[in-house]
Image (tube, grey):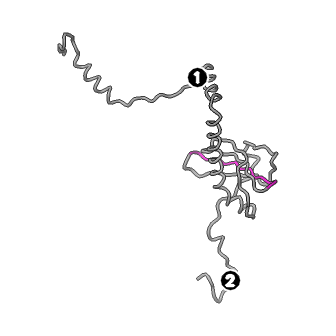
């Protein structure tokens, strides 16, 4: 059915179609990098970041890597059976969300390398480590070069049963 308005014909169906079209979600703009020209433009944009922008980005990535490393400190200390004075990330690789490969300074000359992965954000980390590395040792992305890091200890392991005997128990 058609109606005359202002000297022109307007289809009633077109009004209905426009009303439905207005209720649909608007697609967000995404960046696709398919052609070599697009890849070159994206790299050029990354290169043209100001030095301040690049330094800020590096600072926050370093802080994020330090936060990931901090999650494993107690477990590494338990595995090495020593309390560590230093725990500073010297180098890192990975996205720090699903994969983190970290070089952590334990002392002046000793480093520990950590290889941690997880399926997705919110899942527990699966962690491996390589203790007593030097500053010159490169980070390795191959899981085989690391040994499993023992899981968190249970609270019962910290209870001292030396004061217990059959006659009386100090814990009860």
Residue at image point 63% right, 88% down: 168
Q: Which mark is residue 163?
A: 2
In the orientation shown, which residue stands out farthest toward the top? Answer: 7
Toward which corner of the image does residue 11 lie, by quadrant? top left
Q: Earlier in the sequence, mark 1 or mark 2?
A: 1
Toward which corner of the image does residue 70 lie, by quadrant? bottom right
Residue 27 lies, with reference to residue 136, above or below; the image says above
Residue 5: percent from left, percent from top: 18, 14
Residue at image point 62% right, 69% down: 155
In front of the other: 72 or 55:
55
**Distance in Å between CA atoms under marks 1 and 2:** 70 Å
Question: Crowding at label 2, few (<14), some or many (≥20) Cα neighbours within 10 Å?
Answer: few
Residue 127: percent from left, percent from top: 67, 52
Residue at image point 81% right, 45% down: 137
Residue 102: percent from left, percent from top: 70, 47
SS at circle 2: loop
Residue 167 lies, with reference to residue 137, above or below; the image says below
Residue picked out by circle 1: 34
Q: Is residue 116 magenta?
A: yes
């Amino acid at each position: 059915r058609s109606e005359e308005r202002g000297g022109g014909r307007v289809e009633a169906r077109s009004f209905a179609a426009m009303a439905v079209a207005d209720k649909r979600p608007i697609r967000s703009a995404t960046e696709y990098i398919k052609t070599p020209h697009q890849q070159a433009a994206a790299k050029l944009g990354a290169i043209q970041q100001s030095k301040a922008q690049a330094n800020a980005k590096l600072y926050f990535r370093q802080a994020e890597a330090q936060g990931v490393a901090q999650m494993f400190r107690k477990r590494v200390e338990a595995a090495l059976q020593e309390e560590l004075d230093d725990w500073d990330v010297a180098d890192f690789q990975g996205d720090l969300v699903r994969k983190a490969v970290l070089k952590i300074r334990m002392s002046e000359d000793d480093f520990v390398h950590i290889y941690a992965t997880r399926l997705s954000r919110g899942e527990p980390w699966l962690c491996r480590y390589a203790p007593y590395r030097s500053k010159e040792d490169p980070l390795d992305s191959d899981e085989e070069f690391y040994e499993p890091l023992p899981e968190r200890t249970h609270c019962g392991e910290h209870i001292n049963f030396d004061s217990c005997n059959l006659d009386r128990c100090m814990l009860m």
